[in-house]
Amino acid sequence: MLHAVNLSKRYQETLALDNLNLSIEAGDIYCLLGANGAGKSTTINLFLNFIAPTEGKAVIDMIDVAKDPLKTKEVIAYIPENLNLYGELSGLENLEYFVGLSKKRYPKEVLIAFLNDAGLQEEAHTQRVKKYSKGMRQKVGIAIALAKKAKALLLDEPTSGLDPKASNEFSELLIKLSDQGVATLMATHDLFRAKETGTDIGIMKSGKLVEQLSTKDIDHSELEKLYLHHMDN
Ligand SMILES: Nc1ncnc2c1ncn2[C@@H]1O[C@H](COP(=O)(O)OP(=O)(O)OP(=O)(O)O)[C@@H](O)[C@H]1O
């Protein structure tokens, strides 16, 4: 579903991403780990066509992102660290608006069902988003992904700053989406969540993918050791 093929991005003298090859299939939750500046956001931004590759390609659902960015955007949902919602609108109104951008229309009760499925408590649906916690905003993001029937989810540090309960709830939603066949690429600094939630882990350093593994082959402390080993060498 999501493929990086010899994907590179250079900014003047900085090689932000160096020949990345990556395959994320339906149901995979692929967690990208790495220090600040390792190239995680660059990877996600290339899949979103926010930036253009210097070499190689990002492919979503067999379509080259740079060649047909609008078509690829139809099948993905993106949740950044801080989701940009309209503070004066309610969660329900935000959902209606953003789903409308993707040319989908649903009756109000179906939109409410998406918010419920995303775990947003009923009384919050009609409250202005400016009063929401970060966890509640991220749930609206998940509701948008559900309503768009997104095949792939791109997440850039979505749980940073969430308390452990909110972070756990978010992870459970990702697993629910994965069970429905959604392919997820998530940049994160949270080794614990990556092991708990992810199916696969990639460790990046200085623009290179230096390690790939399946989460079932490693425990928490081995993952931490491996991560620190790569950061120290
Ligand atoms: N617009 C830009 N112009 C120049 N250099 C950039 C630009 N965007 C990113 N870089 C550089 O590319 C490299 C990779 O950055 P990137 O943001 O992908 O890292 P990251 O792994 O997401 O880090 P973080 O964990 O801090 O979010 C860094 O050296 C960064 O300084």
Image (cartoon, rainbow, N blue to C red):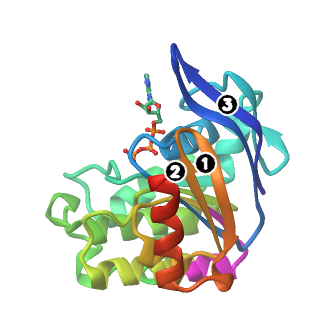
Residue 162 sits above or below residue 186 on the image:
below
Residue 17 sits above or below residue 194 on the image:
above
Q: Which residue is mark 1?
A: 103
- Number of the front mark, 3 or 1: 3
Percent position of residue 139, x then y = 38, 71
User: In whole angstroms, how far apart are the C-alphas of marks 2 and 1?
Assistant: 5 Å
Confirm whether the magenta stretch covers residue 190: no
Q: Quadrant of ligand 1?
A: top left
The numbered dot on residue 8 is 3
Q: Evaluate if marks 2 and 1 touch, with contact meaning CB atoms under 8 Å apart.
A: yes
Percent position of residue 217, x then y = 68, 83
Three-letter amino acid code at the position of disc 2? Gly
Query: What residue lies at 45% left-to-right and 54% top-to-bottom?
Result: 232
First-in-chain label (2 vs 3): 3
Would you say 207 lies left or right of 58 here?
left
Q: Which residue is mark 2?
A: 100
Q: Secondary structure at mark 1?
A: loop
Query: What residue lies at 31% left-to-right and 51% top-to-bottom?
Result: 85
Extent of the magenta region: 175-184
**Total label count?**
3
